[in-house]
Image (cartoon, helix red, strand yellow):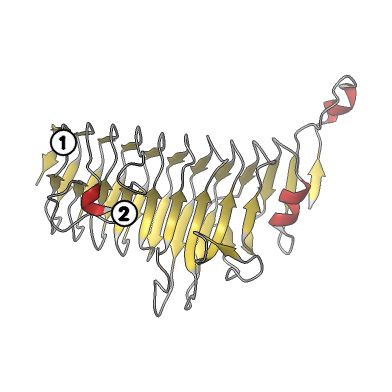
């Protein structure tokens, strides 16, 4: 691992705080070591290759960037979750590949993979959780290729889980393989834009409430392609969310479902206790969804100008 500090840094004698720099990690070296040695605002550059480790970005690493050479060249593969044992929620063992607690973190241009083989934990590809805010995941591939009993714990696997971490941007990523839910959002103020979401064993993208009174509001689901989910392509439980210009096709449930007490089948927990209200669903393309195309069981939603085949 190399730490490179801009040459002009030595001239800034009046600066008393650490100066952001680039750290380079090559094959056989540890991403976590680079994170531990980084200061706020640093960029960690990963060479091409496969890194078998699970990493944690603690709260004091604000503004950290981790960047690869592209999703086909730079891969972070789960180590099985055994080296840094975690639980999410309490009592549920979790195999979390990228666990983010810091604000303003950027992850870009790499693959994050749960490889083939059986698991005895809850698989989570990328996890944003408090005090994380205003982070981004861009041009990555998040994939799970598990075999055997896919969901040994409840709650189940997630490609991306954003839990109460507001202001996260998820842009131009590919979500593949057999995660139960690819993008799972018990949160507010998230932007999910121009992603490809394929073959979830339950739901492609879900804005979900933790309980009937929790808030999952002001999320933007825009321009995504969602296909092959075993249940709904996109499911919305919260309020004041925007769902526009998405393509949803060949999902076994609804293309887009707005939840409410009369939804059949019931939405995922808390299911019928959560009513989607005041959402905007517009200009989406929906076709060949076995459970219907756009289903509104909520209240006061605006559903208009959608293309349904």
Above or below, 231 against 61 in this view is: below
Most extreme residue toward the top is 14
Nearer the observer, 78 or 155: 155
- Percent x, y of residue 134: 52, 34
Label 2, label 1: how far apart the Cα atoms are: 23 Å
Above or below, 270 against 153 in this view is: above
Q: Secondary structure at mark 2?
A: strand
The residue under the point 84% across, 25% down is: 8
Above or below, 97 against 244 in this view is: below
Nearer the observer, 119 or 29: 119
Most extreme residue toward the front is 213
- Percent x, y of residue 273: 24, 49
The residue under the point 26% across, 59% down is: 229
Nearer the observer, 35 or 307: 35
- Please tell me how crowded label 2 is: few (under 14), some (14-19), or many (20+) other residues with Cα within 10 Å: many
267 left or right of 84?
A: left
The residue under the point 65% across, 65% down is: 84
For residue 145, which quarter of the picture? bottom left
Most extreme residue toward the left is 309
Q: Looking at the rendered structure, which numbered label has been put on residue 33?
A: none
Q: Looking at the image, do the residues carrying marks 2 and 1 touch, with CB atoms under 8 Å apart?
A: no
Of circles 2 and 1, the one toward us is 1
- Percent x, y of residue 58: 66, 47
309 left or right of 242?
A: left
Q: Secondary structure at mark 1?
A: loop
- Percent x, y of residue 17: 82, 28
Q: Looking at the rendered structure, which numbered label has been put on residue 204?
A: 2
Q: Looking at the rendered structure, which numbered label has been put on residue 299?
A: 1
């Amino acid at each position: 691992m190399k730490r490179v500090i801009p040459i002009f840094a030595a001239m800034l004698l009046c600066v008393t705080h650490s100066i952001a720099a680039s750290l380079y990690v090559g094959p056989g070296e540890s991403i976590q070591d680079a994170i531990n040695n980084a200061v706020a605002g640093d960029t960690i550059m990963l060479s091409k290759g496969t890194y078998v480790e699970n990493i944690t970005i603690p709260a004091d690493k604000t503004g950290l960037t981790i960047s690869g050479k592209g999703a086909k060249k730079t891969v972070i593969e789960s180590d099985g979750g055994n080296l840094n044992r975690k639980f999410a929620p309490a009592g549920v063992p979790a195999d979390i590949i990228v666990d983010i607690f810091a604000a303003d973190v950027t992850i870009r241009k790499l693959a994050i993979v749960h490889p083939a083989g059986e698991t005895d934990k809850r698989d989570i590809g990328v996890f944003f959780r408090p005090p994380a805010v205003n982070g981004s995941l861009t041009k990555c591939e998040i994939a799970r290729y598990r075999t055997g009993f896919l969901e040994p714990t409840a709650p189940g696997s997630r490609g991306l889980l954003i839990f109460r971490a507001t202001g996260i941007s998820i842009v131009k990523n590919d979500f593949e393989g057999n995660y139960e839910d690819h993008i799972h959002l018990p949160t507010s103020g998230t932007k999910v834009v121009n992603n490809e979401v394929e073959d979830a064993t339950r739901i492609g993208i879900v804005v979900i409430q933790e309980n009937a009174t929790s808030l999952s509001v002001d999320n933007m689901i825009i321009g995504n392609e969602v296909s092959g989910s075993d249940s709904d392509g996109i499911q919305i439980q919260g309020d004041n969310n925007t769902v526009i210009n998405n393509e949803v096709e060949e999902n076994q449930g609804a293309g887009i479902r707005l939840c409410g007490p009369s939804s059949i089948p019931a939405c995922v927990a808390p299911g019928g206790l959560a009513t989607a209200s005041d959402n905007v669903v517009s200009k989406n393309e929906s076709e060949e969804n076995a459970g219907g195309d756009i289903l509104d069981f909520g209240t006061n939603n605006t559903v208009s100008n959608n293309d349904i085949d």
